[in-house]
Amino acid sequence: MVLSNAMTSHQAGLRPPPGTDRYRFELPARPDAVSRARRLTCGRLDSWAVGDETRGTAALVVSELFTNAVMHTASARIVCELRHSDTGIRIAVQDEGFEPGGPKVCETPEDENGRGLLLVAAVSTSWGSQMAAGGAGRVVWAQLPHA
């Protein structure tokens, strides 16, 4: 399955606002790719002179979203896109195949899955998921404010 270039339906067909920096990378859907995704994210945010707190939060979000894509999908590759603008950082992670019904947040303290999305929700101003353009998997995204 080929990953779509359009990261979210919100972004599909839209150009980023002027002054928005974009960075996109693709990694194999393996557990060892999670740490590489964090390093790539931190490196890019350093080059954009993003503050330490925002950079750390973005690394956490990328780690959680990548881990979910590795553990809960039938993907061979995962794509991450970072956007930096005056309003903050937008992170979008696209997989190639998803669980029916989309990502699940834990509902009770006994739930073993979904805790990562609780973290994402707690540190993000907004987050969500939708089918990728062309039905090529799912995109989970989060918006982070500047610290």
Image (cartoon, rainbow, N blue to C red):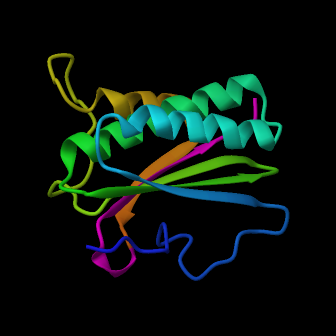
Q: Residue furthest top?
A: 109
Q: Residue 123, image x and y in percent?
A: 55, 30
In front: 29, or 125?
29
Identify the image quadrant of residue 105.
top left
Answer above or below: position of 81 versus 38.
below
**Can residue 74 be seen at all in this image of the molecule?**
yes
Q: Is residue 143 magenta?
A: yes
Q: Residue 84, image x and y in percent?
A: 73, 51
What residue is at 21 percent from the left and 16 percent from the top? 109
Answer above or below: position of 123 versus 130.
above
In front: 94, or 102?
94
Q: Residue 38, image x and y in percent?
A: 52, 34
Answer above or below: position of 17 versus 37.
below
Answer above or below: position of 134 versus 32.
below
What quarter of the picture does the C terminus occupy? Answer: top right
Image-based side of 33 in relation to 98, left or right = right
**Can residue 121 be seen at all in this image of the molecule?**
no
Q: Is residue 10 magenta?
A: no
Identify the image quadrant of residue 47.
top right
What quarter of the picture does the N terminus occupy? Answer: bottom left
First to last magenta residue range? 133-147
Image-based side of 112 in relation to 36, left or right = left
What residue is at 74 percent from the left and 24 percent from the top? 52
What residue is at 71 percent from the left and 69 percent from the top? 16
Q: Residue 31, image x and y in percent?
A: 30, 35
**Number of marks drawn:** 0
